[in-house]
Amino acid sequence: MVSDRRVCYLEELEQALDTRGLVARVVRTRTGPAFLRVVNPEAASLAEDVTCAPAPESHDHYYWWSWGERMHRVDDPGGAAVKLAHVLQPLERQPREACARRVQGPPRRSPDLELERPSRRP
């Protein structure tokens, strides 16, 4: 059955994601296609639902992002896992002072604080 093959592909991706520290489970619904729910356990709001289906122009199966864009070939679940791990990685936060300095730029020197240059004597 076609959906069984797709579930197998999703289960292969699930295993590849497990080695990268992401939590993934295949979800089977009564009415729609199965999908893989992927969550970053360090930041649970970072999650993605991955489906598996053939490309419209061929019979080759691919993993698909939740917004309908083709992600990666099913014959390379490790490559798809790398992409998912990258997308679900939290941004590193910087201290507020560093962010403020970046926005404001480097400190400016006041003209009042300029040192007087010694005059040259002839």
Image (cartoon, grey):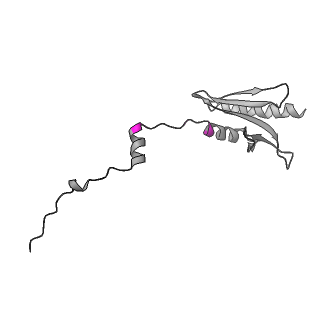
Q: Is residue 57 magenta?
A: no
Residue drawn where x is 75% and y is 40% of the image = 64
The image quarter in which residue 86 lies? top right
Give the farthest residue toward the bottom. Answer: 122
Q: Quadrant of the N terminus?
A: top right
Asked if residue 1 lies left or right of residue 65, the reply is right
Residue 48 visible? The answer is yes
Residue at screen point 38% across, 45% down:
101
Camera-side residue of 113 and 44: 113
In front: 122, or 19? Answer: 122
Residue 74 visible in this rendered orientation of the protein: no
> Where is residue 38 drawn, in percent x and y?
68, 31
What residue is shown at x 73% (from left), y 37% (from top)? 66
Considering depth in this image, is 49 or 83 the residue closer to the camera?
49
The residue at the far left in this view is: 122
Say whether residue 92 is magenta. Answer: yes
Residue 108 position in % (x across, y down): 31, 52
**Residue positioned 86% across, 31% down in the render:** 4
Count of numbered marks: 0
Instruction: Report the quarter where the C terminus lies.
Output: bottom left
Q: Residue extending furthest front? A: 112
> Which quadrant of the structure image shows residue 9?
top right
Q: Position of residue 77 (x, y in %)?
A: 72, 38
* Looking at the image, residue 53 lies above or below residue 4: below
Q: Residue furthest right?
A: 1
Residues drawn in magenta: 86-96
Place of residue 40 in the rendered image (x, y in percent of width and height, measured from the top left): 61, 30
Is the residue 84 above or below the residue 28 in the image? below
> Looking at the picture, does residue 31 appear above or below residue 73?
above
70 sits left or right of 93 in the view: right
Q: Quadrant of residue 78?
A: top right
Instruction: State whether the magenta stretch is mostly helix, strand or loop.
Output: loop
